[in-house]
Structure formats: C-alpha cells, structure tokens
Amino acid sequence: MTTRNAFPVGLYATLLLALCWLLLPEVLRPVERFLLGVACLPQRALSVLGGAPAYALPREHLARLAQLESELRRRSTQNDVERVRPLMPAALEPMACAVLTASRRGGGGVPCELLLDRTYQDLAGCADLVTCGDVLLGFLAQPGIGPAAADLATDPARVLLLNHPDGRQVAASLPLAAGSTLRCVVGPASIVDPAPLRTTLHDDPYRAAAFAEGGVPLRTLALDAPWIGAMPSGLLLGTSRVWGYETGGETLTIGLFVELVHDPRALPQVVLWQSVPGSVPTRLQPERLPARAGPLPDQGGGRWLVQGSRSLPDGAAVVQDGVCLGTLRSVAFGQGLCTPFASSRHAWSLWLLPDDPELAPLGIYGEVVYASGATAWFRERGGFQGGGGGFVFTGSNGADCPPGLLLGRAEPDLARKTWRITVPALHGNQRVEVLSTRMSTEGR
C-alpha cells in the first residue's frame, strides 16, 4: 500500500517569505532591525562588563585636528573661488556650501542632483549659478517649482546639475583649428547616452559634423536670450567627446557630446554667489549623540556594536574626538552596527588635503578594495589621479556623514594605482559619538 507525500507547506511558506523579503525590503526592514537588535542584546550585556570605555586620540592631538580642518576649509574655498572670481559679476560674493548627497540618475547615467547643507530660505539672496573653480556645475532649484515641487523653503537646497533632465540649456563655444570657434547649445543627454551632456543647434552644422577631436574644452557664451538666460562668459562646461563611426580612417560624427569635469559623487563642496551683502546663512548641523562602541566577536574586528540612548540613524558617521571611524547601520533598541572604514565595501566620497600647500584639496570617489589591519587600499572610480600624500576627510556621503570629518592618512600606491589610507586602530570598548542631522541656528 502506498501513501502520498504531504504538500511541503513549510518549505513553500519559507520560500514565499524570502521572496517577499527580496522584493519588498523596505516593508520588512523594521522586522529585520528588530531581529538584529534582539541578537545584539547578549553582546550589549557583555560589553557592560568589559571595563571603562577609552578614547582613541590623546587630548594634545585635538589642536592638530582643528588646524587640519581649518586648512582644508581655507584651501578648498580659495581654490574654488580664485579661478572663477574674474568671470563673475563684481556685485556677487562667493559662498562655499558643503554637498551632502549626489542622487538621481541623469544624462550619461551619472547623478544629476546635489543636496546642500543650507536651506532654500538661507540662500534666498543668492544667484542660481553653482560653480566649482571655473566650472559651471548647474543651477539652484526653486522650492515648489519643477523637480523641487515637493520641497519647502525650510528644506535643504537642491542643485540641478547640467545633466538633469529638467536642467537649463547653456550657450557655449568650442575652439576649432585656425582660431575659429563653433557655437552651440549644451544641454542634458539621455541616461543611455555615452556622456552626460550633448550639443545641439550648432551655428555651422557642416563643421560640427566634421569635428572629430575629443578632450576639447567647451565654455559658456554671454548670450542673453529668454529661452537660455543670462550667463557669464568663459565658465567651463566640460570637454568634447565625439560619438560616431570609423570609415576609411576617418570619423563619421553622429553626435557631439560633453564629458563633465567633476564626478558629482566626488564633489564635497560647491560655491554659490550671493547678491545680498552681509547675509550669513545657516548650515545643516549634525547633532552629536553620545554612544558606546565595542567589537563584535568576529575574530577580525570587522564590525562594532554601537549603543546609544535613543534610535540611531542609518548611514550616520561614528566619530571619536573628531575622527570618523566608519558608518552605522541602525538596529532596534538604540543599537547600531558600525563598519569601520577599512572593512567597508560600499562606495565612499573622500576629500584629500595634500601635504603640498600649493595644491588644492582633491575630491575622489571609489571604494576600499583591500585592507590589512588599520590600513585600507582605496581605488578611485574613473581612474587613479595620483599625486602626493596627505590627510583624507569624508566627502558627500549623506546628511549624517557630512564632508570634513578626518579619516586618516593617505599615500599613493603607484604599483596598485590606489590610495593607501591608514586609519586609527581601535581596541576594546570606546566612547564615541553618532551624528544625527538637525537644523542649527549657528552659521559658520
């Protein structure tokens, strides 16, 4: 006599739950945080018996840290302003703003929006031009209009880069042989295009179709037209990139595109131009929540359990005496899992302050590809820029991990074409702080 096997209800229910977890991660995220929080409770109890928390840096090092932060702000602002100042109207004064995030895919598949550390109402006296050095990045959005239709005046200001689908078109000139120029209009390309920007409305279509040279700079024209708008002349937009076919040793140009000068994800700071003298706008200041961190028993020090007095934000920087140790993943019961920088595998925006006082700070974007103890090898996306060593700070990694937090010391590794970054080594329980964004009434 044979019997039929029962339908495996448990197995299919587990598979269905796993599928829902993959397809609806945000819906089930609270459940995941609760379960992780419960799993961390025994470790939290054990850490209380682990002795008094320690500090990473001696007190005498704090003065050196303040000096480095001041030098970073001074040199970055000087570099971002001095090259563009002669091109801007004399009535406008520069104001540096930190970049919190770069988001939304635009032309060429790269981010096309920046979020700043100041609100719209704080920037009410500014022109809409946004620059970095002599490069025109884009334009300041207006709350309640277009892509910022859902934004309020008290929200962090949004910058629409030139490759934004709703971005403004700009009149430009492209130098040709024998001193002639090709005039055109530069606007956003599509997401699938080979570059973020493309040219249209050439004043000489024949010469545009015959153009086959890449890497040529395009700069703005001072053309005042209702459908384009007033623009200072000479601001750099990017460099040319020809898209076409090779036919008999010659290039048949199909489209003339423009590569951006800066990767938006590597921009820690931009410059706005205010027309109201003496205005001191506020910044979006992160609150520092006191917490306690202890290593998890994973034999490698890859993660730390952070315990606070209240819920901790996802992606927040964990700092100690002004030094960023890593970023946080929030779980239940006021706990979080901190992954140190050397053990991280997600992309980082960094800000390098070179030792050479004549060199400007450098924004880089990439990820840690290898680590040994407290040393990490960081590879840039888009190619290794090289240069001398220096101190490395955080770039635009989110509102709770703002630019300007010291990470460690960076040296170029020419053999691997990476940056070798040495960060503080931690042992045992530590007193730390977790950054949480809030609006501050103090300008700086």
Image (cartoon, grey):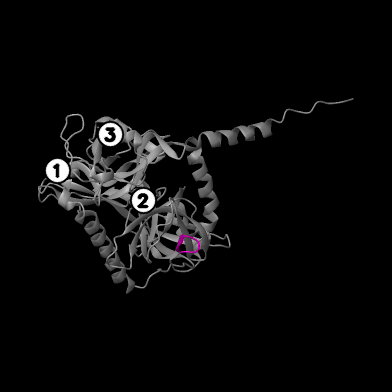
In this view, the residue in front, 254 or 278, is 254
The quadrant in which residue 62 appears is bottom left
Q: Position of residue 281 (x, y in %)?
A: 18, 49
The percent coordinates of residue 163 (x first, y second) are 33, 38
Residue 266 is labelled as 2
In the picture as drawn, the residue positioned furthest to the bottom comes out as 60
User: What span is in magenta?
Assistant: 414-422
Q: Which mark is residue 125?
A: 1
- Secondary structure of the residue carrying tag 1 is loop
The local crowd at label 3, few if under 14, some if 14 to 19, many if 20 or more residues have their Cα within 10 Å, is: some
* 2 or 1: tag closer to the N-terminus: 1
Whether residue 268 can be seen here = yes
N-terminal of the two: label 3 or label 2? 3
| Residue 199 appearing in the image | no
Q: Any mark on residue 286, and which?
A: none
Q: Residue furthest right?
A: 1
Residue located beneath label 3 in the image: 148
Question: Which kind of residue does numbered mark 3 sit on?
Answer: Ala
- The image position of residue 426, as x and y in percent, is 46, 67
Q: Quadrant of the C terminus?
A: bottom left
Residue at x 32%, y 54% (from the top left corner): 403
Q: Amino acid at mark 2?
A: Ala
Indicate the secondary structure of the residue bearing disc 3.
Answer: helix
Residue at 42 percent of width and 47 percent of height: 314
Is residue 234 magenta-colored?
A: no
- Where 15 sits versus 384, above or below? above
CA gap between label 2 and label 1 equals 27 Å
Q: Nearer the viewer, residue 342 or 352?
A: 352
Q: Is residue 43 left or right of residue 422?
A: right
Is mark 3 in CB contact (under 8 Å) with mark 2? no
